[in-house]
Amino acid sequence: MLPTESGAQTPEFALPADRSLLLVDDDKPFLQRLSRAMEARGFQVTAAESVAEGLAAVATRPPAFAVVDMRLGDGNGLDVISALNEARPDARGVILTGYGNIATAVTAVKLGAVDYLAKPADADEVFAALLALAGKTADLPENPMSADRVRWEHIQRIYELCSRNVSETARRLGMHRRTLQRILAKRAPR
């Protein structure tokens, strides 16, 4: 058993020979805490605070594992997942986000992510996601989505289909671009 930050015990997993892990998050305190927690679990961690640093790390030495924040100051974390999948198809990447929605989760999986976790995710959740067995499915949500949430999900899906182009998304949805920008800037409704 391995100790967690809270002192609880987590089951030991058989880590693969290559334990390289790239963490990409622009929240420095979170990045430092997660780095320490994952090092304690046997990973060799490389930390990056931007998409550019993450892409450079992937280009230099593609890691076996990656945990990447979705929204970073200089771009979208999906770009790092995509580059990792191209450089090392067997790598296991997990996306973290405070703005979870179905469309971006589907996009993340298509680009090579093995899981999609909502922030704040703890080290135990990240560890389990990185080492989860293939084919394991997530538990169903207890509460179904509201009508507002379904609308928001639809907008996000169209946004992703338009390659995150606000003008094209607004045109396809028949709404003003500024209205769409306000919707995209907000958190998902419950």
Image: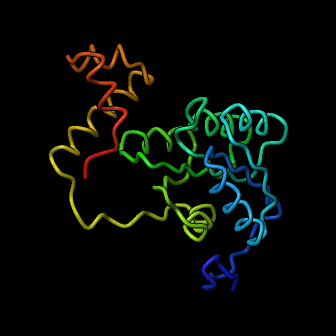
Residue 157: x and y in percent read 33, 33
Q: Residue drawn at (63%, 46%), measured in percent from left and top?
A: 25
Image coordinates of residue 186 in percent, x first then y, are 33, 38
Residue closest to the eye, 137 or 45: 45
**In this figure, which colouring scheme has been used for the structure?**
rainbow
Q: Residue furthest left?
A: 147
Give the residue at x 77% y 48%.
Answer: 63
Quarter-wise, where is residue 11 in the image? bottom right
Residue 168 or residue 176, whichever sits in front? 176
Residue 105: image location, x then y, percent: 43, 45
| In this picture, residue 64 sits left or right of residue 105 | right
Position of residue 138 in the picture relative to residue 75 (left or right): left
> Residue 132 occupies which quadrant of the picture?
bottom right
Q: Residue at x 39, y 21 (%)?
A: 162
Residue under the image location 48 percent in, 48 percent down: 97
Q: Is residue 176 above or below residue 129?
A: above
User: Is 84 placed above or below 6 here?
Assistant: above
Q: Quadrant of the N terminus?
A: bottom right
Residue 20 locus on image (x, y percent):
79, 55
Number of labelled discs?
0
Residue at the front extreme of this rendering: 29
Viewer-proximal residue, 118 or 32?
A: 32
Establish if 45 lies above or below 173: below
